[in-house]
Amino acid sequence: MESAAPAKAEGATKTTGAAAPLRASEPTQTPEPGQVSDPEAVFDPAEAARPEPSSKAPSSKAPSSKAPSSKAPSSKAPSTEAPSPEAPPRTDPELLLAASVLLADAALTAKQAGAELSGALSSRRLALEALRRPGWAVGTAVSCARALAGPSGLGFGSHGGLLGELARFAGIVTYRRPAAVALAVDAFALRIGAIASDHPNLDAPLARRLTDAVVAGNRLEALRAMYALVEHLGVTRALTTVSPVIMELLALLSLLDENPVNDGFSWVTLAGGVPTTDPFFGLPSTLLKYLNPGPGRAERAEADSILAKVLATSANDIVSYVTDIGALGNHGLVLLRRVECTDGAVRHVLLLPGTSFALLSNSTPQDLVGAFDGLLRTDTTYTRAARKLLLRAGVPAGSEIMLVGHSLGGLTAMNLAADVEVSSRYQVTHVITLGSPIDGKRPADHTTQVISLVNKHDVIPMLDGRGPASPNGIPDSWVELAWLDESYDYPLSHAPQAYSDTLRGPMAHHREKVNALIGAYDGRIVGNQPYMLRDK
């Protein structure tokens, strides 16, 4: 696998500079020989995280500024020998990520403790014990209430059950911040700080103003900061600037508002999962099936002159596949390819383009509603239409098939691979996605090779909740190739052309790796059939 590390930022050679120090405005200075460091110096987490050997334990003596030493100066003379090399310290981003994981675990534990205490207070068992031992029951209830509501306890950390939710709502409207929420906010803040080391634009004053306001829960200031950022950079550049931390910012906004219904988005994001609710109203993803109810339909179509010209030069090459997807457009067309491979087998390739941003909903599955549906669910209109395409095309049962998709097309490719019906009828050998938020999905067949290509300037792949500072990784069998390229602004950074240009140029080694993994599909193309997919 190219990367076993949790974050999408791994898996490719970093093109950014060295990590910025934790306190860029306060560079560490080396003390002069014989000089004692200032005891009021700013706490350095790198030093705290590094265990001190017993021979270097802090001295209990007063600093030398209080009294001169009576010992001979020669005993304190600095050595002229070069210091022995020490193990390189961990970088600041690593420390921040490690601390954020610990804080996230603590926050989730505190939340669970609040739920268990709330459940105990409202349990039938406590009520029955109160009849037998009223004094014990009253003492227990008072202790639980203090633990839940006291500032030295969970601080209005009740959760779950009717009484627990009422108490939690009372804490929210009175601006009481539970311990779990405070820990979660700090964890998100550390994630943002860690991400900024690889994305220096997040450290610019306007971007810092926005992130600081969101962390502080000051929505009015956050709106002003966002307005200033957009006014200064424009909409696309502003969106691209905050894209690496978009999930953290949305999670903080939903956690620190007065709406208790949308908090689930924040807790799932904190744990590194894929949220199943929206961050503003807490609406469940199950509502999407009512907004995207089409059964799906597939009709044969003819390639126009432009598409036909592109398809005439197609080959089993990742750049060629991305070029073909770009030529298909995003108005409902997909392509089924039949290949007579060099080993004598006949295999199929299904090319799936992404979303049309023209309308919220249109007559094809490639709309914005379909995009959100594909992210949060598996059985979507796009998936159902693609299943019908394979049946209508007469792809024989047991055939080997490779699914290649961009954006929503990549989501649909993973949804098809996760479909038990599809996996039991066909052998899905490869799923290749470009700019797709697929990390929360898994193929039904564990032998399916998943290859994910990610431009780290692209905001869309991070919508699965696994951003650059996510604590969770991906399966070891997956291949994830990520990079930073010159296509900074969204949506340019998300376009198929940006991916193909990068794979053709500076990331040509990624192109070679992917082509080696899909070498079984080398051969002669004997069929390129476009299909038009409809909602119904």
Image (tube, rainbow, N blue to C red):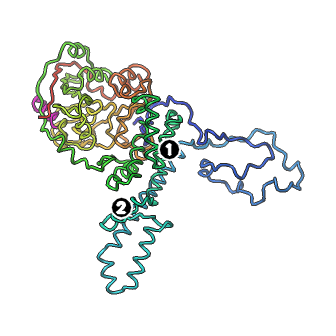
The quarter of the image holding the N terminus is: top left
Is residue 360 one of those drawn in magenta?
no
Look at the image and tell me whether residue 404 can be seen. no
Total marks in image: 2
Residue at 49% x, 66% y: name it. 151
Q: Give the residue at mark 1.
A: 212
Where residue 456 appears, x then y in whole percent?
42, 32
Most common SS among magenta residues: helix
Q: Residues within 10 Å of mark 2 (few under 14, many from 20)?
A: many
Q: Quadrant of residue 70?
A: bottom right
Look at the image and tell me whether residue 369 can be seen. yes
Q: Which residues are drawn in magenta?
A: 384-395
Q: Is residue 377 left or right of residue 135?
A: left
Where residue 220 appears, x then y in whole percent?
44, 45
Q: Amino acid at mark 1?
A: Asp
Q: Quadrant of residue 12?
A: top left
Where residue 241 appears, x then y in whole percent?
45, 33
Q: Give the residue at mark 2.
A: 169
Separation of disc 2 and disc 1 at Cα? 25 Å
Where residue 484 appears, x then y in whole percent?
45, 29
